[in-house]
Amino acid sequence: MASSSGSGSGSTGSLSTAAAMAMAAASGTEEEMRALMEQRRAKRMLSNRESARRSRMRKQRHLDDLAAQAAHLRRENAHVAAALGLTARGLQAVDAENAVLRTQAAELAARLHSLNDIIACMSASNNTAAAVALTVAAAATATTADPLGFDG
């Protein structure tokens, strides 16, 4: 029995050895799978790092573009502000000149009105003087002429 037990044990040992060999083969495959998974994980990590680096570069380019655009807009704003200042000063000069011209136009209109009054007054005076002169001339002619119309 011992022998059968030994044999049984041996055959159980054989099974154990076969199982151990199968496990070793499986563990070798498992090791290969672990190595493959580790390789894939390392590749994925490297890919993610590269993707993150490209993303950071894109972000930096975008920030650089925005900074350049902001600088350009600041320069353009300064030019527009300067042009606006020149235009405002020009407008003030034109407004001042218009005020002077309005004042001169009002003074000239008043002077014209005054001259028209003088002309009207002189015209009325001349008409009166002419009428008086005609009356005097008519009276003088009447006194020198024969009142009966006989010229001698």
Image (cartoon, rainbow, N blue to C red):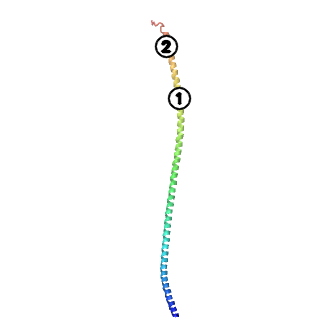
Residue 6, given in percent of the width and then of the height, sits at 51, 92
Report the residue that reaches farthest toward the front.
1
Q: Nearer the viewer, residue 131 or 27?
A: 27
Q: CA distance from mark 1 to mark 2?
A: 37 Å
Q: Residue 113's mark?
A: 1
Question: Relative to 66, is 150 above or below?
Answer: above
Q: Nearer the viewer, residue 71 or 11?
A: 11
Sooner in the amino-acid sequence: mark 1 or mark 2 = 1
Please tell me the numbered disc located at residue 138.
Answer: 2
Disc 2 is placed on an element classified as helix
Closer to us: mark 1 or mark 2? 1
* Residue at (50% x, 15% y) in the render: 135
Query: For the residue labelled by badge 1, is the local secondary structure a helix, a strand or a loop?
Result: helix
Q: Considering the image in quadrants, where does the C terminus appear?
A: top left
Kind of residue sitting beneath label 2: Ala
Q: Residues within 10 Å of mark 1 (few under 14, many from 20)?
A: few
Type of the residue with mark 1 = His
Above or below residue 136? Residue 85 is: below
User: Residue 60's x, y, as percent?
Assistant: 51, 63
Q: Is residue 3 above or below residue 99?
A: below
Q: Counting other residues with Cα less than 10 Å from the Cα at mark 2, is it few (<14), some (14-19), or many (20 or more)?
A: few
Q: How many marks?
A: 2
Q: Nearer the viewer, residue 58 or 81?
A: 58
Could you say which is closer to the camera, residue 58 or residue 29? Answer: 29
| Label ID, residue 92 | none
At which x and y percent is residue 40? 48, 73
Q: Residue at x 49, y 86 (%)?
A: 15
